[in-house]
Amino acid sequence: MPRRMTATKEGTHQVLKNSSFESLVVSWLMQDGWQVFVPILDNGHQTDILISDGPNYHRIQVKTVEAAGEDHKLENRWRDSSVDVVVVFARNANWGYIMPAFTQNQRRLNAEGHQKFLHTKKSFLKAFHKL
């Protein structure tokens, strides 16, 4: 059985974890019937995932946070972009939030209009459909 025998650098390990959350969102949306596109490079556009139902396209930014609670304040790092939806995973818990992109400098995860989900496809899609 294959085993990884080399150490992974801390920064690299964090990038791998963040990418795994993006892959979860891609998988769950594809299973829901969306066409999913992943930019080769999202630098400048702040788009991790682009989805389409055919005529409509939506830009998604995926974030991960170390949240002490659901009132954690998320910093807006997609300002001046065309992001439509932000998906936030709490790395240190089994929940996250889906929200429309906002223009303020920061906003609480559990602000009005944000949809909480558990780290499961069913819970994620239920919250996603409420947007």
Image (tube, rainbow, N blue to C red):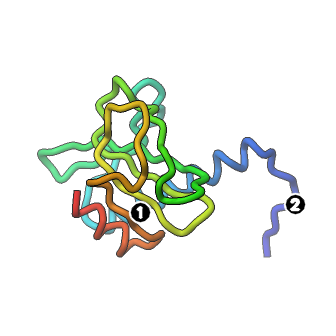
Hey, what amino acid is under mark 1?
Ser
- Tell whether label 2 touches label 1 (CB within 8 Å): no
Classed neighbour count for the residue bearing mark 1: other residues with Cα under 10 Å, few (<14), some (14–19), many (≥20): some
The residue shown at (26%, 54%) is 113
For the point 48% across and 27% down, which residue is it?
A: 43
Position of 103 with respect to 97 (left or right) is left
Whole-number angstrom distance, CA of label 1 to CA of label 2: 28 Å
Residue 82 drawn at (x, y percent): 29, 31
Disc 2 residue crowd, few under 14, some 14–19, many 20+, Cα 10 Å: few
Which residue: 87% across, 54% down?
6
- Residue 99 image label: none
Given residues 124 and 106, the one toward you in this image is: 106
Location of the C terminus by quadrant is bottom left
Residue 75 % position (x, y): 48, 37
SS class, disc 1:
helix
Under tag 2, what secondary structure?
loop
Q: Amino acid at mark 2?
A: Met
Identify residue for label 1: 27
Q: Which residue bears the numbered disc 2?
A: 5
Q: Residue farthest to the front?
A: 71
Q: x%, y% of residue 121?
A: 39, 71
Quadrant location of the N terminus in the rendered image: bottom right
